Amino acid sequence: MGNHIRKTNNQCQTRPRKSGAKKNRRRLEQRRRLVALGMNEEEVARLTSREILDLLKRPAKIGKES
C-alpha cells in the first residue's frame, strides 16, 4: 500500500507540451511520405492534416487510387 502513495507523489508535475515547430516538421514529413507513395503534389497540398493522417493509416490503398 505504501508503494502506491510513493508512486503518485513521485510523478512529474509538468508534462511536456507539443511545440509548433515539431508539429510543422511532422506534417511536412507526412506530406513528403504521401508524395513518395505516389500521390500528386497538388493533391497533397489541398489536403487537411486530418485527411493526411487518415491516408497514411492505409498506405497500400494510396497507389491503387491514384
Image (tube, rainbow, N blue to C red):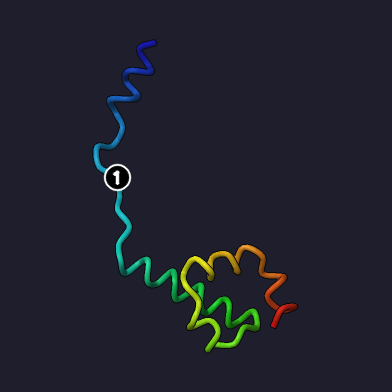
Is residue 59 found left or right of 7 in the rendered image?
Answer: right
> Residue 17, relative to residue 9: is it above or below?
below
- Front in this rendered view, residue 10 or 63: 63
Say which quadrant the C terminus sits in.
Answer: bottom right
Residue 46 locus on image (x, y percent): 49, 82
Is residue 61 found left or right of 5 in the rendered image?
Answer: right
Residue 65 locus on image (x, y percent): 71, 78
Residue beneath label 1, please?
15
Q: Residue furthest left?
A: 13
Is residue 30 found left or right of 11 in the rendered image?
Answer: right
Residue 47 locus on image (x, y percent): 50, 77
- Front in this rendered view, residue 17 or 54: 54
The residue located at (28%, 37%) in the rendering is: 12
Helix, strand, or loop for circle 1?
loop
The residue located at (40%, 72%) in the rendering is: 25
The residue located at (54%, 87%) in the rendering is: 41
- Front in this rendered view, residue 4 or 49: 49
Q: Residue furthest right?
A: 64
Q: Residue furthest top?
A: 1
> Residue 40, relative to residue 65: is it above or below?
below
Say which quadrant the N terminus sits in.
Answer: top left
Residue 19 locus on image (x, y percent): 30, 62
The amino acid type of the residue labelled 1 equals: Arg
Question: Within 10 Å of the Cα at label 1, are there few (<14), some (14-19), or many (20+) other Cα atoms?
Answer: few
Which quadrant of the figure has residue 27? bottom left
